[in-house]
Image (cartoon, coloured by chain):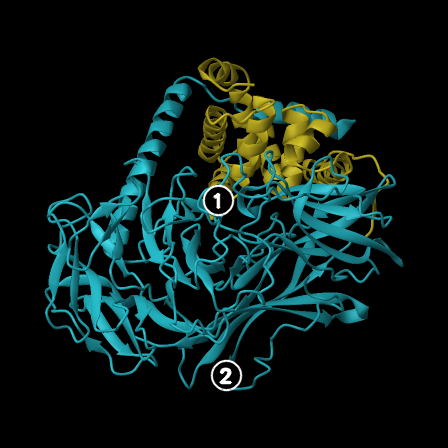
Chain colours: A yellow, B cyan
Amino acid sequence: MRVDEIALREFLHTAYPRLVAAVALVCGSRPAAEDAVQEALLRAWERSEKGEEIESLNAWVTTVSLNLARSGLRRLRTERRARGRLQASAVGETGGDRVDVERALLALPRRQREAVVLRYYVQLDTREVGRALGINEGTVKSTLSRARAALADRLGVQEPEEANHRGG
Amino acid sequence: MAVDERLRRELEQAGRPADPSGVYEDLIRRRERRRLARRIKAGALAVAVAVGCIAGIVVLSRVFARAPVEPAAGAGQGIVFGDGTGEETDLFVVQADGSGLRRLTHDGGSGAASWSPDGSKIVFARYEQTQTSDLFVMNPLGSEVTRLTETPGISEAEARWSPDGSKIAFEASGIGQDGVYVMDANGSNVVRLTAPEMDSSSPDWSPDGSQLVFDVTPTPTATEEGPGGIEIWIMDADGGDPHPIVGDGASGNYEPRWSPGGDLIVFTRDRDVYIVRPDGTGLKNLTPQAGADVYDRDAAWSSDGERIVFASGRTHDDALSLFTMNPDGTDVQPVLDSAIGFCCPRPDWHGDAVGVPSPEPSPTEEPSPAVEGEDLGLGFPVCNVTSIEDEFAEPSVNSTAFVATRMGDTGGCPQADDAFNVIALDMVGDRKAETSFGPIECTIECRAFSSPDLDGDGTAELLVVQSGGSVLGMRLYDFESVDGDVAIVPVDVAPPGDPDALLEPGEQASFLLGGDAFELYTLQCLSLDEGVVGLAFTLAESLPHDAPDAEWHAHEVIVELKDDGLLHVVNARDFTEPVTDDPGGPSFRSDKTLCGANLGP
């Protein structure tokens, strides 16, 4: 598809609000999430202007914005500061659902966080999650399985037993 | 499922959708800022070139991240040039027909190289932690590096051997030290040739060794487009009779190189390559055809004077590549089919212009043959394939792990830096992957490195080099069986990790390996209690640098891959030990293998 003003405006009004929210859940920082999604959009736009074909703007921007939020020392520092703020502010709060789940998410390994947010917030199926994260469906399942177990423990929810064998 | 439902509900509440108002306008502004920044970078580059400095180098494109080429053929001749990644530059050598490309340095701070007259050595500038450069000599394979200068606070660069090989002329920059100097080829007897008030750089010898040509910036504020310009001057080899031959008070003229025949000098004027006779007559633009907006610069002669190599931006956006042409500007031929960084190609050619395509190539001739990719069963061809065979998925059953780069859409093997790099596993021995993982990000290098069995269960894990240079950056992957399928899984660090050892909790486990006399990163395999395997990762710095009483100040972590699939830090400590002359290295030196696994390929 061609990424032009019409496509960008449509993306901004349909996919952008929830994608920023999803990336913010993953990286713990709203400004970093907005920065990552906007940078990904800009790259899609520039690539399209150079003649590169972008099959699905939603899928491309989701993958690239997660990669951008993941990479770089600057974002790591942003994230660390955000975690510090989050933990500090949580002390004075009543422990509502929002803080509980955000804190539980941020305690997960990065890839588990990404998989959980894409599966349960963006509501992609496991195949689509795999495509967005560049991993195969089997890896998505095992990642989600671990994440669910950890989250169930932190949120105090019963998690059914699942067979899961490690090798290698 | 209780967890699924609660996650959906709570994430819905926690996720705060963003307001898209004004974002499109922000994108427009962001794009314009970026375009402006690119233009500013291009301008800044010209200034950096004008003052002959490789410190303020701006690199606008990624370079070669190719697999090393066998060094035997062509050693001692070819075109040596600098190429940058990020804000770093390393030296490469290539033959004029594009063959035999190989990398000479891996420190990220080397450039401005030139050949000795007999082709047995290369002199070059290397930036070190002090942010100033010194001169070094190496052989044409990039080894046997010897220091020539050591001057804190002063940078030496742009060194050129005299035709008889006995002396080296170079430029220096530093407060009150700017100018052209000469020294014996072993680094002794340094003599300043230009007056202190003369801001001069980029010397080159006349073929009989009696004179030097160099560039002069008459006023401190001059830039390539500013008042004063930059001029080409000639002086005697002892510094006598300095006089200008090119300069109009406005244009920037720099990087002069004397022809082997002695009758011409080629140099860069603004964004074109010019030629002039030593008496200042016969000024001619050799590269008007590329247009005024395209950079053509950094010209140098073949040893027989039959061709000129130069860098040009005519074929790549925001990047340069190398080309050759006749001394009259005709028959421009590409040397490389890849882009190189803006700073600082500075090619230097040792060898005659043999192997360069004929003067009248067919217009339909492809500038470079397409690289043929390999089919690993991934649905797309790959290149830059490296592999390791080991028992990855099941004990006693060998499988092969590949690391490769997806081929470009129009053929050719892309640089790993911006490419789709992938890990693949062949479990049945048909060189076709049953499972894969990607894309993975790589810088400079992307290759399979080692297959240690870190959890001691009889199957191997995989270490992949994802950043190159003098210190390798490696990431750890595991192979996991789920419902009969094998998945390649990045191994993350368990909380709390150890940020001092760069092991961030929740991030993929990564290690560094390599270093130099001052900083060292090592890996050792250990047997922990009850037969458990551990890995010791040590980061050390010798302080004070280069002092007889220096000590290694080291931080060591012991990590263990546990059944939860995470890498746990089980111990961390700081220690010191004396730096000794022991050729084996310090006590924490890396093992020759890693938990029994070979290092490589």
Mark 2 belongs to chain: B
Label 1 marks a residue whose chain is A
* Horizontal side, residue B586 vs residue A136: left or right: left
- Horizontal and vertical percent for residue B34? 36, 33
Q: Point out the image quarter for the C terminus of chain B.
A: bottom right
- Say which of B553 and B434 sits in front: B434
Q: Position of residue A77 (x, y in %)?
A: 46, 46
Question: In terms of secondary structure, where does tag 1 sit?
Answer: helix
Of the two numbered discs 2 and 1 in the rendering, the one whose residue sits closer to the viewer: 2
Residue labelled with disc 2: B578
Q: Determine contact: label 2, label 1, CB under 8 Å.
A: no
Tag 1: amino acid: Gly
Q: Look at 44% across and 58% down and name the residue there.
A: B353
Do the residues indicated by labels 2 and 1 lie within the same chain of the protein? no
Question: Where does residue B98 sit, x and y in percent of width and height?
Answer: 51, 52
Q: Amino acid at mark 2?
A: Pro
Q: Residues within 10 Å of mark 2 (few under 14, many from 20)?
A: some
The image quadrant that residue A5 belongs to is top left
- Position of B220 with respect to B23 (left or right) is left
Residue holding disc 1: A84
User: Is residue B565 something that shows in the picture?
Assistant: no
Q: Is residue B583 positioned above or below B599 on the image?
A: below
Camera-nearest residue between B536 and B133: B133
Q: Residue B304 lies in what quarter of the image? A: bottom left
Q: Is residue B468 above or below residue A8?
A: below
As measured in the structure, the alpha-carbon distance from the residue carrying label 2 to the one carrying label 1 is 39 Å
